Image (tube, helix red, strand yellow):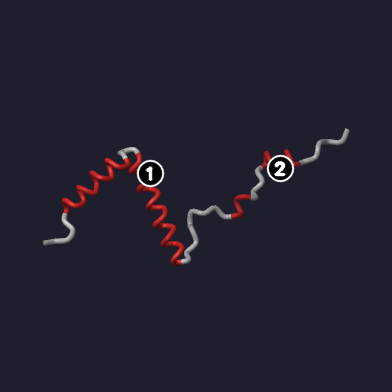
Amino acid sequence: MEFFQPWHLIIVAVLLLVLFGAKRLPELGKGLGEGWKGFKEGLSGAPDPNAKTSDTAHTVTPKAADELKPPPAA
């Protein structure tokens, strides 16, 4: 007797559909995947390649630079 057979997966899938519904399952899968990815990165100590660096946070656009200039003296 095998411990894990294909029909076990079918039963688990049906139970998940009944408990959480079809709309909620993709959200749960995404959250689980992101959590697992973060866990693995935390163990390896690798930096997140998707994280924004602080260099782009302080970039001043030309429009913003014009707004920073003082008004002309009268």
Task: Specify the label residue 27 is tagged with.
Answer: 1
Q: Is residue 57 left or right of residue 4?
A: right
Q: Position of residue 41 (x, y in %)?
A: 44, 62
Q: Is residue 39 left or right of residue 70?
A: left
Outermost residue on the right side: it is: 74
Outermost residue on the top side: it is: 74
Q: Position of residue 67 (x, y in %)?
A: 73, 38
Measured in 3D between alpha carbons, the distance from the residue under mark 1 to the one under mark 2, in whole angstroms, is: 41 Å
Q: Amino acid at mark 2?
A: Ala
Find numbered disc 1 in the image and state the secondary structure of the residue it sits on: helix
Point out the image quarter for the N terminus: bottom left
Binning the other alpha carbons within 10 Å of mark 1 as few (below 14), some (14 to 19) or many (20 upward) gives few
Residue at x 48%, y 53% (from the top left corner):
50
Read off the residue under disc 2.
65
| Disc 1 to disc 2: CB gap under 8 Å | no
Task: Specify the label residue 68 is tagged with.
Answer: none
How many numbered markers are drawn?
2
Residue at x 32%, y 41% (from the top left corner):
20
Tell me if residue 42 comes above or below residue 23 in the rendering. below
Q: Amino acid at mark 1?
A: Glu
Decide which of 68, 39 is in the foreground and name it.
39
Decide which of 12, 34 is in the foreground and name it.
12
Q: In which image quadrant can residue 71 be found?
A: top right
Residue at x 25%, y 45% (from the top left corner):
15
Point out the image quarter for the C terminus: top right
Find numbered disc 2 in the image and state the secondary structure of the residue it sits on: helix
Numbered disc in front, either 1 or 2: 1
Decide which of 58, 41 is in the foreground and name it.
41
Q: Position of residue 37 (x, y in %)?
A: 41, 57
Outermost residue on the left side: it is: 1
